Amino acid sequence: MKRALKIVGVVIVLVIVVLIALPFLINVNAFRPRIESDLSKALGREVKVGNLSLSILSGNVAAENLSIADDPAFSKAPFIQAKALKVGVEMMPLIFSKQVHVTNLTLDQPQISLIKNSSGKWNFSSLGKNAHAPGAQQTSPEAPPAKAPEAARKPAQAPSSGPKAGEPLEQNLSVAKLNVTDGRVSVGDANSSAKPRVYDKVNVTVTNFSMDSQFPFTLTCNLPGGGDLKLDGTAGPIDPDDAAASPVQAKLKINQLNLAASGFVEPSSGIAGITNVDATLQSNGHIAKSSGTVNADKLKLSPKGSPAARPVQIKYATDFNLDKQTGLLTQGDVALGQALAHLTGAYDVHGPKPILNMKLDAPNMSVNELQAMLPALGVVLPQGSSLQGGTLSTALSINGPADNPVITGPLKLADTKLAGFDLGSKLSAVSALSGAKTGNDTSIKNLSTDARVGPEGISTNNVNLNIPALGTVTGSGNISPAGALNYHLTANVAGSAVSGLSQLAGMSGNGASIPFFVQGTTSNPQFVPDVKGIVGSQLSNQLGNQLKGRLPQSNNPGANQAIDALSGLFGKKKKKQ
């Protein structure tokens, strides 16, 4: 019994000695030229690996450094650089046959550079494209022969006629498990001065990877400016002509994306906020479809705006043409509480800036819900005031660069009030309107206008405002980007609101038309009388009535000339009948 125990002990010691000695007996660096050659052929790019080491117990071959060249049309710098590459191998074939059977690959702390050119092509599109092209890099003559992975390690859905022993690796590169740990990916545009977006803590897990079959994957990373992303689904087979056109089906989750710091929007647009996304992606390599829900908090949509007081939810669906870099938003339901708007249309991202051609349809939106969104849009109401009650309806066209589009269309406001704003007291500066009494809140029956929002500011034409306590106000004007007002309006007032200069001017007690200006700023509007308009209009009316009674217009053209000359002195000419 003791003799048997001694024999077992000797065997154990011998095994330990062998395990310790094997890494020194097997020169794994002899496999490096073959590994570099096979990977270079498979990827169509020059691949370099550093010093190799072997761990018998873990079954890993480790390389100190790895670099994969970029497409020369994009950059001379490496496409991928990794601190370490760990290759899991089957030990028995390695020890007894000196053949490498790869079971897993792990890239540790890789630095990956993704670049897109003006036509929408990526620098990784050509990966594997030249693997079988004439003149492709050949296997190094001094490299020992390698055996491709066995069929048992091939991924699900791989072709049943798997690689045969001795078959070159590049014809069917397959790995049971592929990992990327703690990577850093930069994404930018070719020939652009803009800083690339950087994604940290990139981790990727791929199982049953094969170039010519579908394989599952999971990707997680930290987003530029804050937040994180998870993409979970399947990809492949890898398109041999354009790796970027390979099919993908996945679920996307984005948490706490900071829009302003992300680099996804132009800083000049003023767009900011924290968003969460829950969506699905499906691409056949040419058309990508995506749908899901975006929740945005503290949203800001204007350089002059401030964060919205409540969250916004968007349910969307879009089709994107990967070849043309154009898309169609088929669903864009924007909800602010109970207020709902519908955004649809086309977009084009192939140029330096995204171009929009869209429509926003928003019928009968609750003003109370919209009130919280006004600051985000840069809309400034008179100081201390707010809109309460009623509805807003609009149908807007949105065209031009996404960071500074031109927005046009009608606006209609109904049955609301501007609480905290006494229009009557403001109008007292216009003597002819000093009799108007609106109270501390200004009730608005209807307001309609044709609006245009562009780089030069906001212009509103065909303004028609119905204020029960005053009458009807018509005219047009504009608001500068800084908020300065420049409006010329006419109040068609009811008889009870007419006093002061209107009576002195001989206006009818049943009503009158009083022209005036609105100046100042949106937060502090100033109402200024149009003296020329008031005097000229009333003088023209009175003279016209008197002269026309004595000198009929049809027989006395001089009467019309006299009326025009006198009224012209006050800046307003009487139109010929």
Image (cartoon, grey):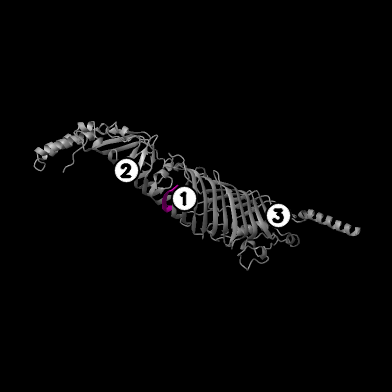
- First in residue order: circle 1 vs circle 3: 3
Which dot marks residue 314? Answer: 1
- First in residue order: circle 2 vs circle 1: 1
Label 3 crowding class (10 Å Cα cut-off): few <14, some 14-19, many 20+?
A: many
Label 2 amino acid?
A: Lys
Viewer-nearest of labels 2 and 1? 2
Residue 78 in view (yes/no): no
Circle 2 sits on which residue?
A: 445
Which dot marks residue 414? Answer: none
Q: Secondary structure at mark 2?
A: strand
Circle 3 sits on which residue?
A: 61
Quarter-of-image position of residue 500: top left
Q: Secondary structure at mark 1?
A: strand
Viewer-nearest of labels 2 and 3? 2
Residue at image coords 40%, 34%: 384
Label 1 amino acid?
A: Ile
Which secondary structure is most common in the magenta stretch?
strand
Q: Based on the picture, tell me whether residue 191 belongs to the magenta stretch.
A: no
Is residue 530 positioned above or below 291 on the image? above
**Pick the front one: 73 or 251:** 251
Q: Secondary structure at mark 3?
A: strand
Calculate the distance from the C-alpha at mark 1 to the C-alpha at mark 3: 49 Å
Calculate the distance from the C-alpha at mark 2 to the C-alpha at mark 3: 79 Å
Is residue 294 positioned above or below 514 on the image? below
Query: Which range of residues does the magenta coloring cover?
Result: 334-350
Residue 49 in view (yes/no): yes
Looking at the rendered image, the quarter that the C terminus falls into is: top left
